[in-house]
């Protein structure tokens, strides 16, 4: 398997599935990174959710939820899977945040008291600011202006008290009780590894560890137990996975923080090192990306009624044709009258 075939198979795994509802797409993706709500919607679109109202509808209906899971980062997942996924990551996320909670004055007493009070406050979806206000009315003394509210909500999430649902106002996520969910798989880590390899494969245990935040040994054991097939030494794919058939280039405009860009320990095949800082310039920011047949070829932005693409190098004619179709699909999903402008590559 050469690099071109590897990338095309990864492209098929991420973006080659039939259209589906938000919960199904989130399940098949192993979860969708969701610290940016708009980017999460674009991630669902790129993977087959065509209806722009579907992401919000699924959250409002309780079919999907958002909570901190892999690498301690917010992910959108099916509500049915929320509790067993939380079981994989809660202890690690709590330990990672312990020092910062202490620095913010979130003592054990404050946190435990919040856990006692929060269930009664979740009779309706509430914003983080409203929850903090109501907790402070009970004497908790949480600083509403700094990072303490986010860390307290993260603490409550890790304890299975609440999660994010639909917005209660523009850019204000609502918090709701964590749903009961469905039965947990017999081996949760192996189940997550199977979903990861179905969505990202071919990939290796180190890739799964980097994406999930699980220890490498745990990741290696989970991949071995997942039923995946080794397609090249050290690389695994879901059983039955096939190479993308020959045809025109497959083009996707991905939102910020997209799973595909962040899904591997070694990203050099996906994003050539000389261009890496044009997507990930540091500070935790990962820009929206143009990906073609598995390789990131540029970035893009929305600007004054246009979708503006900044390619790293000159795009072949067939790629430009596919990009025009993809840009039209993105504009329709965003419900925007936006044309496409391709900038001249720098240098």
Image (cartoon, rainbow, N blue to C red):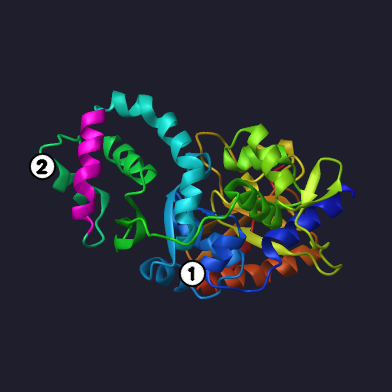
Which disc number belongs to residue 334? 1
Helix, strand or loop status at disc 1: loop
Q: Residue at 54% across / 51% down in the picture?
A: 256
Observer-nearest of 278 and 201:
201
Residue 26 on the magenta span: no
Sooner in the amino-acid sequence: mark 1 or mark 2: 2
Residue that badge 2 annotates:
138
**Circle 2 crowding by C-alpha within 10 Å: few under 14, some 14–19, many from 20:** few
Q: Are marks 1 and 2 in contact (CB under 8 Å)?
A: no
**Residue 9 percent location from the top left of the image:** 79, 57
Q: Residue at 62% across / 74% down in the picture?
A: 19
**Residue 92 percent location from the top left of the image:** 48, 34
Does residue 1 appear in this view?
yes
Range shown magenta:
108-122
**Residue 109 percent location from the top left of the image:** 21, 30
Which disc number belongs to residue 270? none
Q: Nearer the viewer, mark 1 or mark 2?
A: 2
Observer-nearest of 289 and 190:
190
Q: Please state if 50 lies on the left or on the right of 314 as rendered.
A: left
Q: Residue at 44% across / 67% down in the picture?
A: 63
Observer-nearest of 169 and 202:
202
Observer-nearest of 113 and 102:
113
Q: Is residue 321 above or below residue 77?
A: below
Residue 111 on the magenta span: yes
Does residue 266 appear in this view?
no
How far apart, in angstroms, are the residues tagged by discs 1 and 2? 42 Å
Q: Main secondary structure of the magenta part?
A: helix
């Amino acid at each position: 398997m050469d690099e071109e075939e590897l990338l095309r198979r990864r492209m098929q795994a991420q973006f080659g599935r039939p259209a589906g509802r938000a919960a199904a797409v989130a399940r098949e993706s192993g979860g969708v990174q969701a610290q940016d709500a708009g980017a999460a919607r674009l991630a669902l679109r790129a993977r087959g959710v065509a209806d722009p109202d579907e992401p919000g509808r699924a959250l409002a209906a309780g079919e999907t939820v958002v909570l901190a899971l892999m690498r301690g980062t917010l992910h959108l997942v099916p509500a049915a899977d929320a509790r067993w996924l939380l079981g994989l990551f809660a202890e690690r996320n709590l330990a990672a945040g312990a020092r910062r909670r202490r620095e913010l004055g979130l003592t054990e007493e404050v946190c435990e008291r919040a856990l006692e009070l929060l269930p009664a406050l979740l009779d309706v979806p509430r914003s983080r600011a409203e929850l903090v206000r109501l907790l402070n009315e009970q004497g908790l003394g949480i600083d509403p202006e700094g990072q303490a509210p986010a860390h307290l909500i993260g603490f409550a999430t890790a304890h299975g008290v609440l999660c994010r649902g639909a917005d209660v106002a523009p850019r204000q996520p609502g918090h709701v009780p964590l749903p009961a969910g469905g039965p947990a798989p017999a081996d949760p880590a192996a189940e997550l590894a199977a979903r990861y390899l179905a969505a990202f494969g071919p990939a290796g245990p180190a890739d799964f560890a980097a994406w999930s935040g699980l220890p490498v040994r745990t990741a290696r054991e989970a991949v071995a137990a997942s039923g995946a097939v080794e397609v090249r030494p050290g690389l695994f794919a879901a059983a039955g996975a096939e190479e993308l058939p020959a045809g025109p280039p497959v083009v996707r405009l991905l939102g910020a923080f997209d799973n595909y860009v962040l899904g591997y320990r070694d990203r050099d095949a996906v994003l050539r090192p000389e261009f890496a800082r044009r997507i990930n310039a540091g500070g935790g920011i990962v820009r929206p990306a143009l990906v073609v047949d598995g390789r990131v070829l540029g970035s893009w932005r929305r600007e004054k009624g246009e979708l503006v693409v900044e390619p790293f190098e000159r795009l072949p004619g067939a790629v430009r044709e596919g990009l025009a179709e993809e840009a039209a699909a993105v504009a329709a999903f965003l419900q925007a009258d936006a044309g496409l402008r391709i900038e001249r590559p720098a240098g």
